[in-house]
Image: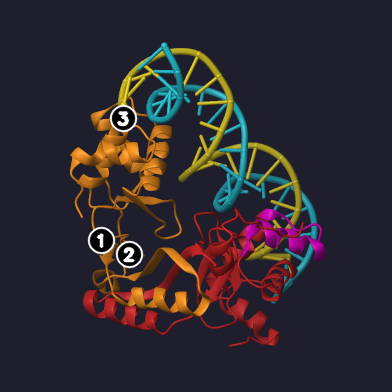
Chain colours: A orange, B red, C yellow, D cyan
Amino acid sequence: MVRPNTNLKETFHAAGRRLTSQRRLILRVLEESDGHLDVETVHRRAKRQNAEISLATVYRALAVLKEIGLVREHRLGEEHAHYEAANDHPHYHFTCLGCGQVIEFDTPLIDRVIQSVHERHRAQILDVHLHLSGYCEQCQRSNNGGSYNDET
Amino acid sequence: MVRPNTNLKETFHAAGRRLTSQRRLILRVLEESDGHLDVETVHRRAKRQNAEISLATVYRALAVLKEIGLVREHRLGEEHAHYEAANDHPHYHFTCLGCGQVIEFDTPLIDRVIQSVHERHRAQILDVHLHLSGYCEQCQRSNNGGSYNDET
DNA sequence: GTCCATGCAAACTGTTTGCACGCGC
DNA sequence: GCGCGTGCAAACAGTTTGCATGGAC
């Protein structure tokens, strides 16, 4: 579901939060990206528009956006957190240990997992994290170390 | 599969590692626990047997044990890493956001997820992390903050 | 005896927080 | 104008590392 900007302010207000330029900027950075940005990258890209924005603000904004439900947090690999805009349907991730690329996928099977855990343990499931890792097609042939490049 | 201690030394040797008292101790701590210990807890329990053992050694030992395949690492919740002995079959986790308890479960559906990702993207899947969170049966009724107690 | 593993403390990284100022509402 | 949000820097927590000593093999 795509959320028209018109409602953004209301979304914040409903959560007792204010819509600031920084928060809007950070959300835009995530929406314009291919997803899975780590905090440092979000900060770097946000500074292109607002050189003054601080890392602490990025952390705080991401926490608020996550709380409101506009942003999702993932722990890919073992490393630090990654974030993406929550515009679209839920999905899961595969990380290539060779080149670092992340492949998104979705599967209806997870709903059945949730259903079965719910039935067996009577637990209420609110969040799901499924993360696969291994080697992508290319890295299987040429088992190079791979490169994880990003702009500066 | 249970691994007889007789082979332990060979397992280490095959990986070019030495079997030290500290590493054996840390492995025993994990095997005797109910699983999902964080590093601090492993250290605390290991010190009961060997008051001298350092936190750095615990970190290094866990890394080696994980590399050798005797121990599995999990990132439950958003927090720090948890470890468990890899004696038994793979399984997955549900964490209650109320009381912090962890429920283990297994499901054949994950194999099908792996299979489907493998077929669709030709990726070689080496590791799977599935983590659910929400509220357990008790915490759904009494939505208390819950308590997360552990020995000292 | 060789060399990896350990203990200690210091360094590092990602994240959080206290405080004074600024801006959304 | 009130009060939350921001920027800055300092504080923190978890984890890693350099170095001299000790123990596995």
Residue A131 colored magenta? no
Q: Earlier in the sequence, mark 3 or mark 1?
A: 3
Q: Amino acid at mark 3?
A: Thr
Q: Nearer the viewer, mark 2 or mark 3?
A: 3
Chain letter belonging to callout 1: A
Using the rendered view, name the quadrant where residue B118 is placed. bottom left
Q: Which range of residues does the magenta coloring cover?
A: B37-55
Report x, y in % for residue B97.
Answer: 53, 58
Residue A80 is left or right of residue B31, and the answer is left
Q: Amino acid at mark 2?
A: His
Q: Is residue C10 above or below residue A101?
A: above
- Residue at 27% x, 80% y is B116
To which residue does mark 2 refer? A93
Report x, y in % for residue A21.
Answer: 28, 29
Report x, y in % for residue B132.
Answer: 46, 66
To which residue does mark 3 refer? A20
- Residue at 23% x, 52% y is A34
